[in-house]
Image (cartoon, rainbow, N blue to C red):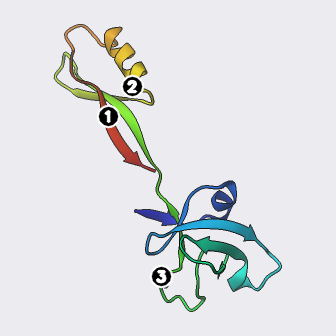
């Protein structure tokens, strides 16, 4: 899964890929260049510079091209505690760190009559 190209994010070093999913290294943004050639990148495994527009498109005629740029999704793991409340509702709480999820579960972060169904279950999410 990819997201639309974001020039500012690319400048910050966020991962960029081509339409085909090949990793791209951002080199420079040159706003004085021709509109279609203002973003300079290198596709992994290639030795030439790829020139695209500021919107990441390789061509201006709206034709999809394998070298169009996108922001890569970033995967990360979060830890989920699943609780069944005293009323029977399922509640999920998400923690960034596994130790924190375990600590919350051990501290009894629940109402009387609630039970934990899962504790610190790792879940990989894409952003």
Q: CB of mark 3 within 8 Å of CB of mark 1?
A: no
Label 3, label 2: how many angstroms apart (C-alpha)? 39 Å
- Of residue 80 and residue 43, the one placed in the foreground of this image is 43
Label 3, label 1: how many angstroms apart (C-alpha)? 34 Å
Quadrant for residue 42, please give it.
Answer: bottom right
Q: CB of mark 3 within 8 Å of CB of mark 2?
A: no
Above or below for 84 versus 77: above
Q: Is residue 59 visible?
A: yes
Which disc, if any, is residue 66? 3
Circle 2 residue: 98
Which disc, if any, is residue 122? 1
Looking at the rendered structure, the secondary structure element under dot 3 is: loop
Q: Residue at x 19, y 10 (%)?
A: 113
> Which badge, 1 or 2, comes first in the chain's sequence?
2
* Classed neighbour count for the residue bearing mark 3: other residues with Cα under 10 Å, few (<14), some (14–19), many (≥20): few
Above or below for 63 versus 75: below
């Amino acid at each position: 899964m990819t997201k639309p190209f974001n020039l500012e994010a690319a400048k910050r070093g966020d991962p960029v890929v081509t339409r085909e999913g090949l990793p791209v290294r951002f080199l420079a943004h040159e706003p004085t260049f021709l509109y279609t050639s203002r973003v300079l990148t290198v596709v992994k495994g290639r030795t030439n510079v790829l020139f695209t527009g500021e919107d990441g498109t390789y061509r201006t005629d709206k034709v999809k091209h394998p070298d169009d740029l996108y922001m890569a999704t970033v995967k990360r793991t979060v830890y989920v505690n699943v609780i069944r409340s005293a009323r029977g509702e399922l509640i999920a709480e998400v923690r960034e760190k596994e130790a924190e999820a375990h600590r919350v579960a051990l501290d009894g972060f629940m109402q009387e009559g609630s039970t934990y169904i899962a504790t610190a279950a790792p879940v990989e999410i894409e952003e």
